[in-house]
Amino acid sequence: MPLVVLAGQPASGKSTAAAQLRALLELHGPVEVLDEPSLHLERNAAYSCSAHEKMARATLKSAVERVLTKRSLVILDSLNNIKGYRYEVWCIARTLGTRYCVVRRSMACQRGTTPAHNGSAGPLTAHNAGAEESSGDLADTVFHAAAIRYRFDDLARRFEMPDSRNRWDAPLFTLRPAGDHAECAEVLDLVAATVTGAAEAPGNAAGAAAATGQLLQPTIATTNPGLLGTNVLHEIDSAAQTVVTAISNAQTQAGGGPAGLLDIGGGAGKLQLTRLVPLAELRRHKRAFLKLATKITFSRIADATTAQRMFVDYLRQQL
C-alpha cells in the first residue's frame, strides 16, 4: 500500500495535515502514522544536536521498513528535510512495489522566524512538543528558549526543498500555508486519490509529476538478494544433470545423430539440436553454468525448474 512522506520546516503544520489526510485515507483501510511521539521520541531531545537527529532519522526509517507492507498504508510525519534521506525512504517503497508521494507543507514566514501560531516559546516547544510536555511552562522543558530558537533556525536553514524532477520527490504536492482551507482540502483529496489509485491525477500547481498513482517497480538496485540455501549447489547440479541426461537419451534414440527439437519438459522449454553434442561437451557446459549460477547471487534461482530453464537458455547460446 502507499507511503506518503510529509516534508517541511518545523512547526509548519505537518501534523495537522497528517491528521486530515489520515481521516481521508482511513476510508480505504487502516492507516499508520509514524512520527516522533509515536516512537517515544521527544522532539526537543531528538533534534537538540546532529547526533541525536541522526538517531531520530534512523529510528523513523527503521519504523517505515517494519510497518510498510503491501497491505498497510503509512504516513511519515516528520521533517524529512534531507533529500538523501527521502531517497532512502523511496527505495523502501520501491522494494515493496507500492505507491509513493511527497507532500510539502510550506510556511507563511521566512526562514529562521517563528510562526505566529507557535508564540514566543519556540516552535519545538509550544506547538510540536505541546502533547509531549506535562506542563506548558517553558521552564519545565529541557532546553531554554534561546537554544530552541537556535536549533529551529539551524533546521530551517538546512531544509532541502523537494523537487518533483527527482524520482524520490515525485509525485510532489504542496500545501499552502494555513488559512486557505478549501485549497488544502482540495490538495489532500488529490493526494488520497493518487496514492490509493482511485484516479489518475494530472498534477497540481506545485509541479506534481504527470505519472501519479503508478506503482513503483522493484529493481536489483533496490531489492536485497534472496538468501542462498545450504544445498543450493546440489539442487542446481541435479537440475542441470537432468537436462544433460535428457539430451543424451534423445541423441541415443536418434541413432547417434542430431536430436532435432527436443522438449526438455517440466517447464524448462525446448532446445534445438542441429548436431551431435558429445557427453564430455555437455558436462563442460554444465560445470561452466554452475560457476555462473553460484557466483551471480542476484540471479535468484528459486527452485529446480528455474535452474533447468536457465541451463537450457545457457545451452541455446553456447551450442
Image (spheres, rainbow, N blue to C red):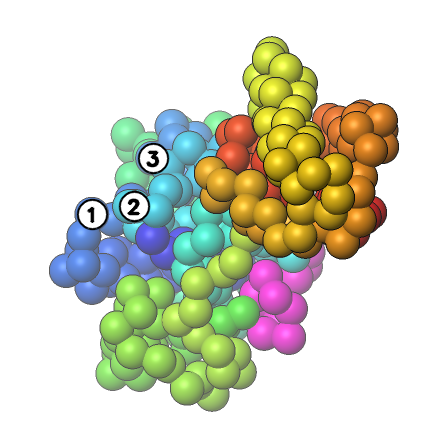
Determine whether label 2 and label 1 are within 8 Å by CB. yes
According to the picture, the residue beneath numbered tag 1 turns out to be 30
* Residue 87 is inside the magenta segment: no
Residue 308, picture quadrant: top right
On residue 72, which mark appears? Answer: 2
Tag 2: amino acid: Ser
According to the picture, the residue beneath numbered tag 3 turns out to be 38
* Residue 161 is inside the magenta segment: yes
Expressed as whole percent of the image width and height from the top left, the position of residue 158 reads 68, 56
First to last magenta residue range: 155-169
| Closer mark to the observer between disc 3 and disc 1 | 1
Name, please, the residue furthest toward the front: 255
Give the main secondary structure of the magenta stretch. Answer: loop
308 or 43, which lies in front? 308
Q: CA distance from mark 3 to mark 1?
A: 16 Å
How would you rate the neighbour count of disc 1 (Cα within 10 Å): few for under 14, some for 14-19, many for 20 or more? few
Is 76 placed above or below 195 here? above
Tag 3: amino acid: Ser
